[in-house]
Amino acid sequence: MQKIINNYAVNQLRKLRRLIFSKSIFVHANANSWINKTGKIDESTTYSGLFSEESEGCLKWNHFSTIYDELLGQYRSKINLKVLEIGVQYGGSQRILRKYFHNSATITGIDIDDNCLNIDTGTNLRIGSSRDENFLKSIVEEMGGIDIVVDDGSHRSSDQKISFEILFPLLSNNGLYIVEDLEHSYFWQSGGVPYLPNTFWNYAKRTTELLNNTFRIYPKLGTLKLEHSDLFSIKFYPQLIAFQKLTRNNLFVSKVGHQYPEGSNGPQ
Ligand SMILES: C[S@@+](CC[C@H](N)C(=O)[O-])C[C@H]1O[C@@H](n2cnc3c(N)ncnc32)[C@H](O)[C@@H]1O
């Protein structure tokens, strides 16, 4: 009996050793994990996975990677995708984006700190401010358009708003505009005073009015410069907001389905 127990224990230990060993191989060999063993692109590699592997410098809230997996998946197969990130710092996010989009996207990062030019990200790095309209426009021109913007720059509400109002109109149809670290809307050091209208969070809340632009008959809200009818959705997450652009054209001009019966006023 003792022998059976010993054999069982030894087998279990061997299994455990195999498991640990294979896991460690996986971790070490996996610096290029977006490419699988056959050299083909591994579609299943997630932003979260790449984020956890990025050791050289990417400081983000953990839950952002879950959000990115939700938001960015639909863009992975897009040909000639163009991604602009505001704020490079140590280049971590640039490297993740490059890997996530299989090296095939045009990825550009901008920063005010010219030390960033010494970082190896495998992406295009440019020095300039997210507040500078001419600079932003020249970057978009150089990229040949933009599909996705990630604002992880100064985190100041006024800067976030300036860049958004310059860049959102330049986004391609179905483009996505993400603003990170909106906890700064609550930090007075970043120009955020909760409940006052000038925080980016509160500004974004007002942009929800643009979703129903077609039906807005009262005067436009004075503090909103944007008057685009192509703002299609706004997703609010903890500390992050994503705006999606979709040209509506005739999207809401006609309704499909049954009309209410004659004489009826519709649902009461
Ligand atoms: C939080 S770090 C970016 C981190 C990077 N996105 C990542 O996740 O790996 C913010 C960066 O924004 C830069 N920055 C600050 N103000 C800026 C501005 N007005 N325009 C462009 N970059 C700015 C800073 O120099 C800093 O490197």
Image: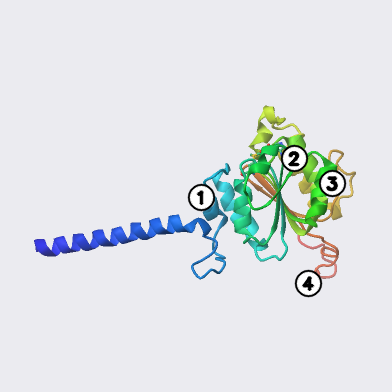
Task: Answer left or right for 89 relative to 161.
Answer: left
Which amino acid does the dot numbered 3 rest on? Leu
Q: Residues within 10 Å of mark 2 (few under 14, many from 20)?
A: many
User: In the figure, residue 5 lies in which quadrant?
Assistant: bottom left
Task: Answer left or right for 215 relative to 53.
Answer: right
Q: Which residue corresponds to the image point at 13% horizontal and 65% vertical from the top-left?
A: 4
Mark 1 vs 3, N-terminal side: 1
User: In the figure, residue 23 lies in which quadrant?
Assistant: bottom left
Which disc, if any, is residue 52?
Answer: 1
3D distance between C-alphas at marks 1 and 3 = 37 Å
**Which mark is in front, 3 or 2?**
2
Q: Residues within 10 Å of mark 4 (few under 14, many from 20)?
A: few
Mark 3 vs 2, N-terminal side: 2
Mark 3 vs 4, N-terminal side: 3
3D distance between C-alphas at marks 3 and 4 = 35 Å
**Which mark is in front, 3 or 4?**
3
3D distance between C-alphas at marks 3 and 2 = 14 Å
Which amino acid does the dot numbered 1 rest on? Ser
- Residue for badge 3: 226
**Which mark is in front, 1 or 2?**
1
Give percent across and percent down for residue 212: 81, 53
- Residue for badge 2: 160
Mark 2 vs 4, N-terminal side: 2
3D distance between C-alphas at marks 1 and 2 = 27 Å
Mark 1 vs 4, N-terminal side: 1
Image marks 3 and 4: residues in contact by CB distance under 8 Å: no
Which amino acid does the dot numbered 4 rest on? His
Task: Answer left or right for 227 relative to 94.
Answer: right
Mark 2: secondary structure: helix
